[in-house]
Image (cartoon, rainbow, N blue to C red):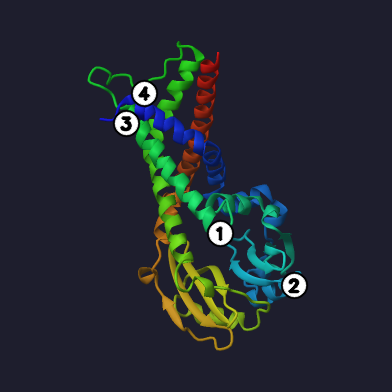
Amino acid sequence: MIAKRTLSSLHRRVAVIAALFLLVQAASGMAISWRWEAARFFDPSGMTGTRGAADADADPEQVLGRAVANLPAASTTRIFFPGDARGVYFLQLDTEQGTHYASINPADGSVLRQGSVWRFPVEAALQLHFQPLPGWPGNLLVLALALALVSLGVTGFLFWLPGQDRGRGRLAIDTRQPAKRVVRQLHRTLGIIALPLLLTIAITGALLTVEILLAASGPSAEKKHYKISTFAGFSRALEAAQQAFPGTQVRDVRISQSGAVRFQFHKPDKDPWEINRVTTSLQAPSVIEPQPASELQAWWPQLLPIHTGSLLGIPGRLLATATAGILGLLTIIGAYMWLDRARQRRS
């Protein structure tokens, strides 16, 4: 068994190096499980659509075409469809200044909000969570943070393991003790209780990042430049794609410069992460390549529901949010303990 002093030293060193980044991950992670709900909460005017009965079946081609006509010169690279009656079309745009975003009212195609990622606080949190630095260095940083969290969990657990005569009361918090000791006990107890959830989030996050890195280094990585400046033929392409998976709902869309369109469908009433893909074309709207969820060569449809807690619905999302909050609290308490220890050494 590794000596307790070695475990404690390793735990502290990893925590000190990763503390600030883990705090950012924890804060941003609390918004991930509630992406669209949180977006409406923080930006109700920019992320809430209005849709009356007459607008319920508004033609996406007309709505999106009207919207891009009112946007600065840009090519649309991705479109998220409204997830409910209050949702909006959310566009990712390629401009000369870089990636911009726009939220579109599904009723009339009016642009509710547009600009850089910092105009959309929840989207900014999402970017910080999955890619805090541009390109693959950001992915590697996230992977390193996930592995650091696993290391902290394992070393903390091994350090806590009760000895033969210390098995009883090892999770108790004695509020009669001095405040500093109570803080240490709180850090220990929260960490042990939340350990299974923290490890689940860390491991799924690491695997999601590995998939992103593998996709970025694949042979087709440089060919995926999805752009469109006009939506002519979009409705026919959507109708053709829906014939492959009737009764499903559009989650998001990507369109290539050649006019090939990739729709991703899901069934929100059953499993919202059971993603079915269809590739069709704006020029000749016939199904080119249907891919049911069972044939999808991707990890994220299985991993992301676990990572965000959405696999268990609202209770799971609340649990994931609480776990992110506990991670933030553990980081803050750990930083306080380290600073107090350093102050004692100097005195």
Q: Nearer the viewer, mark 3 or mark 4?
A: 3
For marks 2 and 3, give the CA distance. Answer: 57 Å
Going by the image, does 323 lie left or right of 127? left
Label disc, if present, on residue 158 of the rendered structure: 3
- Mark 3: amino acid: Leu
Q: Position of residue 126 (x, y in %)?
A: 57, 52
Q: Position of residue 118 (x, y in %)?
A: 69, 53
Label 4 belongs to which residue?
A: 171
For marks 3 and 4, give the CA distance. Answer: 14 Å
The secondary structure type at the circle numbered 4 is loop
For marks 2 and 4, give the CA distance. Answer: 60 Å
- Mark 1: amino acid: Gly
Label 1 belongs to which residue?
A: 135
Q: Is residue 297 visible?
A: yes
Q: Position of residue 280 (x, y in %)?
A: 51, 81
Closest to the observer, 307 or 257: 257
Name the quarter where the C terminus is drawn: top right
Residue 177, image quadrant: top left
**Could you tell me how many numbered marks the image carries?**
4
Closest to the observer, 41 or 325: 325
Going by the image, does 139 lie left or right of 306? right
Label disc, if present, on residue 302 of the rendered structure: none
Q: Nearer the viewer, mark 1 or mark 4?
A: 1
